[in-house]
Structure formats: structure tokens, C-alpha cells
Image: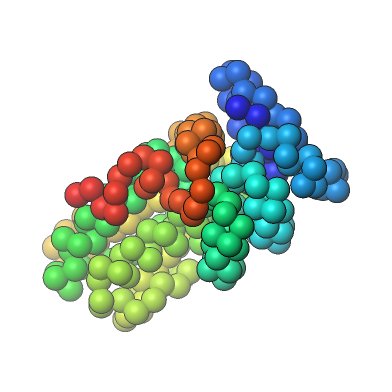
């Protein structure tokens, strides 16, 4: 597999290391210093692009890959305001893209657990819900894309909450997300249901960044030769909700 690696931070370097071990080739490696090398001509050398850049650059990077007819796997978050526009462009150009707030296989299973727990707990309004997430200090967005995915799923199942907010205190109708940034931590997400009598909680803790890189590589291999807009559910064959 020939890979165009767009973004060369900690995740990009982890993917590069994993690709070498698996016998894949990085044919294009883009960072801030050589951003001008991200051209349609250079992209066409790759079978697939993996994008872990920044929220400011990601939309242009996706569009360029679609124009080059190179399928793209997108790990950058905080560009949801452009989601519909980009997906329409992908379908118009008969391209292929897969965006995920988190590529970890464990986190995607955690998404399904969150859905089921939210569904089970919805009738029991005595439980107040809160969501916490911890990431490294270099992470640009807060809350994380993963936390937003978890929160949106809870909102879809529990009508007692109208929205989420990134805050510590709990207000009526608002699902609080508490974001913490610490040096050199891969990521933790925790959901709590608290009543006067007990606490029910689920938690996912990443041990390292390799889990995210492995998932991104699996998605990259899967999307080659396909057309359309996809999710990690498609890669893992989870269906809409397996439970």
C-alpha cells in the first residue's frame, strides 16, 4: 500500500513507524515546512491518503485528495461545520472518504457500549450524566472529537438533555463535558451516571497511540477501491448498532 501521509505530528510519526513494520510505503509526507508539495500530481502517486493535520488545513486537504481521486482517511477533528459540504463534494466527484473522531478499535466498541447504556438509562431521570476526557497538552480542540461523538449519542437517546457544554458544573438540561489537558497522555474518556444512591460508569483509557494508528491503517487498506462516504462502523462491520 502506497500512502500519502498528510500531517506529521505524533500520530503521523506513529503511522509512519507502523507502515514500515507492515511493509507499506510512505510516498508523500506533508508537514508545515513542505505544504506546497501537497499537489494533485504528488497525491496521484499514492493508493490512499491518511490525514492528521490541523482543523485549519483539513478541509482544503480533503478537497485536494478528492480532486486527485485518492481515497482519504481523516483523523483530524473540529471541522464538522463543513461536513455536509465535503460529503456532497465527495459524492459529486465520485470519490471516497472516511472520517472518524477516533480510529481506535477499542474506542469504536466503546461508542457502541455508550449507545446501549444511554438507551437503557434514558427512563431513569434520577441519574445525572457527566462526561470527562483527558488528552495531551498539544491537542488543539476541547472537548475532543471523541467526547463530542459520545455526548451526541447520549443526547440522541436521552431527551432530558438539550445540549452539551464544555464545563465542570452541572446545569439542568445540559450535559457537562469536563476536559483536562496533561503532558504526554494518549487519551481517556469516562461517562458517569450519578444518583443519590449509586454511580454507574464506563471508561476507556488508551495505553499508547498505536491503537489509533492501527485503526487508521486498517481503514486505509479497507477504503482502497471503494467510492462513497464511510464510517468506522463500515470498516468494522458493526452495522448501525449491533446491540
The colour style of the image is rainbow
Q: Nearer the viewer, residue 229 or 157?
A: 229
What residue lies at 46% left-to-right and 51% top-to-bottom? 230
Q: Is residue 80 visible?
A: no
Q: Is residue 87 above or below residue 47?
A: below
Where does residue 145 sit, x and y in percent of width and height?
50, 57
Left or right relative to 151: residue 31: right
Give the quarter of the figure containing the N terminus. top right
Occupied quadrant, residue 177: bottom left
What residue lies at 40% left-to-right and 41% top-to-bottom? 235
Q: Nearer the viewer, residue 94 or 3?
A: 94
Q: How many marks?
A: 0
Q: Nearer the viewer, residue 231 or 149?
A: 231
Q: Nearer the viewer, residue 10 or 129?
A: 10
Occupied quadrant, residue 85: bottom right
Where does residue 160 sit, x and y in percent of width and height?
25, 77
Where does residue 170 sit, x and y in percent of width and height?
36, 74
Where does residue 81 sit, x and y in percent of width and height?
57, 70
Q: Is residue 213 visible?
A: yes
Q: Is residue 163 above or below residue 7?
A: below
What residue lies at 52% left-to-right and 33% top-to-bottom? 221
What residue lies at 57% left-to-right and 54% top-to-bottom? 94
Q: Is residue 170 above or below residue 98?
A: below
Amino acid at each position: 500500500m502506497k500512502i500519502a501521509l498528510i500531517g506529521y505530528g505524533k500520530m503521523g510519526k506513529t503511522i509512519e513507524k507502523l507502515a514500515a513494520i507492515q511493509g507499506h510505503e510512505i510516498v508523500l509526507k506533508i508537514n508545515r515546512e513542505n505544504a506546497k508539495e501537497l499537489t494533485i500530481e504528488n497525491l496521484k502517486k499514492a493508493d490512499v491518503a491518511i490525514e492528521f493535520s490541523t482543523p485549519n488545513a483539513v478541509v482544503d486537504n480533503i478537497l485536494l485528495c478528492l480532486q486527485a481521486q485518492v481515497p482519504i482517511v481523516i483523523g483530524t477533528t473540529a471541522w464538522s461545520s463543513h461536513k455536509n459540504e465535503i460529503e456532497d463534494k465527495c459524492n459529486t466527484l465520485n470519490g471516497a472518504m472516511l472520517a472518524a473522531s477516533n480510529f481506535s478499535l477499542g474506542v469504536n466498541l466503546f461508542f457502541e457500549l455508550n449507545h446501549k447504556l444511554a438507551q437503557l438509562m434514558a427512563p431513569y431521570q434520577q441519574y445525572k450524566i457527566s462526561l470527562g476526557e483527558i488528552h495531551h497538552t498539544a491537542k488543539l480542540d476541547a472537548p475532543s472529537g471523541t467526547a463530542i461523538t459520545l455526548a451526541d449519542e447520549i443526547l440522541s437517546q436521552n431527551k432530558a438533555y438539550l445540549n452539551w457544554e464544555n464545563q465542570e458544573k452541572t446545569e439542568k438540561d445540559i450535559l457537562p463535558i469536563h476536559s483536562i489537558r496533561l503532558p504526554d497522555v494518549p487519551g481517556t474518556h469516562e461517562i458517569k451516571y450519578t444518583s443519590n444512591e449509586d454511580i454507574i460508569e464506563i471508561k476507556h483509557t488508551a495505553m499508547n497511540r498505536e491503537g489509533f494508528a492501527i485503526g487508521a491503517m486498517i481503514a486505509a487498506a479497507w477504503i482502497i477501491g471503494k467510492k462513497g462516504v464511510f464510517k468506522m462502523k463500515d470498516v468494522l462491520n458493526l452495522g448501525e448498532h449491533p446491540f
